Amino acid sequence: MAVIRCNKCTLLAEQADNLVNQKIACPKCGASTLVYPTIYFIEKLLDKYFTAQREVIRLSSQASPATPQTALAKGNDAITGIDLANTDFLASELQHGPIYDWFHKKQIKVQANMRGVDTSGFFDEIAEIIGGNLPVLKEVLERIRWSQQKEHASATISLDKKSPEDAKAISAFCQQLYDFSFVAKCFHNKPENNVRVILQTAPTIRNFFNGEWLEWHALMTCLRYAKERQRRFSCTRGLNLTLANGDPYEIDVFMLIDGDTPVCIECKSGEFRQNIDRHLALKKRLGMDGRQFVMCIAGLSDENAKAFSAMYDLTFANERTLAERLTRLF
């Protein structure tokens, strides 16, 4: 059924579907009233509800003693007392509120995954370890990802041709994967000079090795950047967008600095060239400067990052230079 809501007498009533988008006389007062599709009416109602809910939370926060959440929203002393690598306070409606409002002004629907910024687990720690030493640890990621795709129960990393330093780093990393439950078991086979790991099958772990580690690394880079510079911010990871024409997008990492300056980071651990036009179109739709829309490509050489940035109105970086790129924004 369709629905009307009279602006004169406030009557809310069902109507036949064949009257959608037509104006009829209100059954109660006779005023001309538009007939809406039920889904459209509900979406508008929910938009108003959540906007009002966020405003109530904001006003309540101002009237109550400061807490970590209200401190974040108000940009208090820049969350100096919070361990960004071990907190769930980012995973809240309040923290995401400014992001919802920013996209709403652009008539873009958004859906955030609150757990995407919950750093209580170990995803961020392992991601930062990888990002800090990708050339050495890349083979471990590739072996695990390949084994996952082939539905193998384990992955073996040979240390034969590694330098003593690299072999030690790989062995320590595999042990950390076990300590943090990213793998079910870890065997250090000294006679054969390799490390064998038994894989976990949980979807979150599979997704992490399939590329989400770079999103976590980018998120933590943004959070540390904002905290060090004492900036107000809202952040999200894995943000789903629906444009007015119905086109869907997903932004890997999005941060809003000081309530009005957006930073968008797209993370790619594999092929990325076929998506450049799509990212350029999204950047234009969001009204962002090329410096604010960052393509973080794992393993991309500094030379190629510089060249691609000169070719396109986007900023290219790798896992090592992302922090440096952020410092050039403000």
Image (cartoon, rainbow, N blue to C red):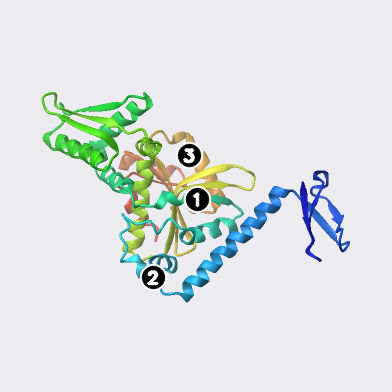
First along the sequence among labels 3 and 1: 1
What x and y, as percent, mark residue 326? 37, 55
- At x 77% / y 52%, what residue is drawn? 3
What x and y, as percent, mark residue 212? 38, 41
Give the alpha-carbon distance from disc 3 to disc 2, as whole Å. 38 Å
**Residue at the spot of label 3:** 276
For label 1, the SS is loop
Q: Is residue 247 above or below residue 220?
A: above
Instruction: Report the amino acid beneath label 2.
Output: Asn
Which of 314/177 is in front? 177
Q: Is residue 306 visible?
A: no
Instruction: Report the amino acid beneath label 1.
Output: Ala
Give the number of the mark in front: 3 or 2. 2
Q: Is residue 164 visible?
A: yes
Whether residue 269 sits left or right of residue 10 in the image: it is left
Whether residue 191 sits left or right of residue 58 in the image: it is left
Which of 3/24 is in front? 3
Give the alpha-carbon distance from disc 1 to disc 2, as whole Å. 24 Å
Q: Mark 3 near mark 1, Cβ–Cβ under 8 Å? A: no
For label 2, the SS is helix
**Residue at the spot of label 1:** 112
What x and y, as percent, mark residue 141? 30, 34
Q: Is residue 148 above or below residue 57?
A: above
**Residue at the spot of label 2:** 76
Residue 248 location, quadrant: top right
What x and y, as percent, mark residue 140? 26, 33
Residue 228 location, quadrant: bottom left
- At x 33% / y 24%, what residue is drawn? 152
Q: Mark 3 near mark 2, Cβ–Cβ under 8 Å? A: no
